[in-house]
Image: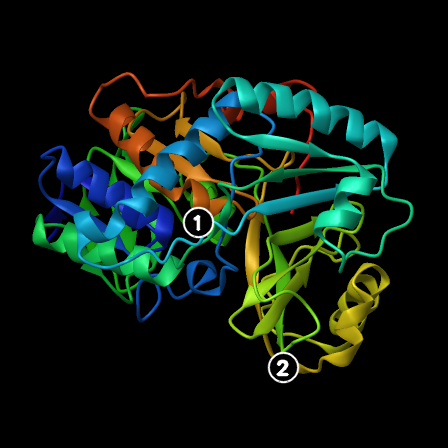
Amino acid sequence: MADTRDVIIIGGGLVGLSVAYHLAEKGVPRIAVLERDAMWARGSSARSAGGVRHEFFHPSSVRFSQYGFKMFRDFEAQFGISASLNPCGYVFLTRDQQRWNTMVELASMQRSLGVPVEILTPDDLRRRYGYIHMPEVVGATFCGQDGVADPGAVAYGWARRARELGVQIRLHAEVTAITQSDGQVTGVVLQDGTVVKAPVVVNAAGPQARYVGALAGIALPVEPYRRSVYVTSAMTALPTEMPMTLELEHTSYIRREGRSILMGMSDPSESSSECVETDQESLEKLVGTVLSWVPALEQASIMRGWAGLYEVSPDDTAIIGEAKSLPGFYYAVGFSGHGFMHSPAAGRVVAELITGETPFVDLTPFALERFQYPTTRETFVI
């Protein structure tokens, strides 16, 4: 016999759980989250480096971050578990004059929205962050409100509250078909043949978003890419308190992880895949890059590492909305490494779309249709 729901959410990661929570808070009944894994939030959500920041290319993305920060700050009071928000700050470094000109322009936009972004000269950097060795640096931006938080705690808080509000989270529930009738979505079919009917289906499948979109006949330009993260031994040669520090030409970054240093880097030469294994080649490339601008790290050794998947869109910005050709099919995908920090707002706007409300921010920058025209990639692509 077919089960019947009001909303089906495909994907039990941070974005899917946020959508479920925000819908349940609005009183939407009979919500089911379908997760193909043995546990929710075990994929990309569990492998996040935890960075949260305000510096983005579009005002709507900045407002997404502002909503998320407020939720993370108040998380324990609202959900009974701390999000462990640490506003250690973010420093973005660049050696490229053209990129720097864009960063200065963006900082003006960000400050107009209430984000306290500082413009730092090379002399400012030398005085404030002596561990950075980058003679060719052109400039940097710093936002002291940015920092890191705990993705696992946030996912747990949302899942627990969603269940309290009646949301059903089903594990080992892989979707193999999306059903339609008269141009309207009608539900899904699971791998074991179970049919779940619903007039609304949300694609929050992360790295599998393109595949799920294809099941509905919707082409979503989202590809999975491996991103590796490593943690060093205890490191006393660097400040005990330091911001997340990122250089944009090679997209490498470091931050404190207790007494150790956590570091990572995007590799534009790596092909799209679903590989989540670390390897010596990528580690050597990362270490060589980071040592070129933080030479003190030569004193450390690598203790552990892991890899996860970014779900990358062509312009490194999320794709959010309802399919024009298939009413009832929604998507919140392609976050390009920003899924954790933008999951609170993504859940809210998808819930607002489903319930017929006006989203609290302009969703034009997230529209699928933007790819019909030339697009500009996000400046901060880490």
Residue 97 locus on image (x, y percent): 86, 31
Locate residue 337 relative to residue 134 in the image: left or right.
left
Residue at the (33%, 60%) spot, across then down: 174
Task: Quarter of the image for the N terminus: give it.
Answer: bottom left
Q: Are marks 2 and 1 in contact (CB under 8 Å)?
A: no
Residue 307 locus on image (x, y percent): 58, 68
Q: Please identify the quarter of the rendering in which residue 30 is found.
A: top left
* Residue situated in front as seen by the camera: 208 or 237: 237
Q: Which residue is mark 2?
A: 233
Q: CA distance from mark 2 to mark 1?
A: 26 Å
Going by the picture, which residue comes out furthest to the front?
127
Element on which disc 2 rests: loop
Residue 329 locus on image (x, y percent): 33, 32
Q: Earlier in the sequence, mark 2 or mark 1?
A: 2
Q: Which residue is mark 1?
A: 340
- Label ID, residue 202: none
Graded by Cα atoms within 10 Å as few (under 14), some (14 to 19) or many (20 or more), the crowding at tag 1 reads many
Locate residue 251 relative to residue 62 in the image: left or right.
right
Residue at the (39%, 58%) spot, across then down: 151
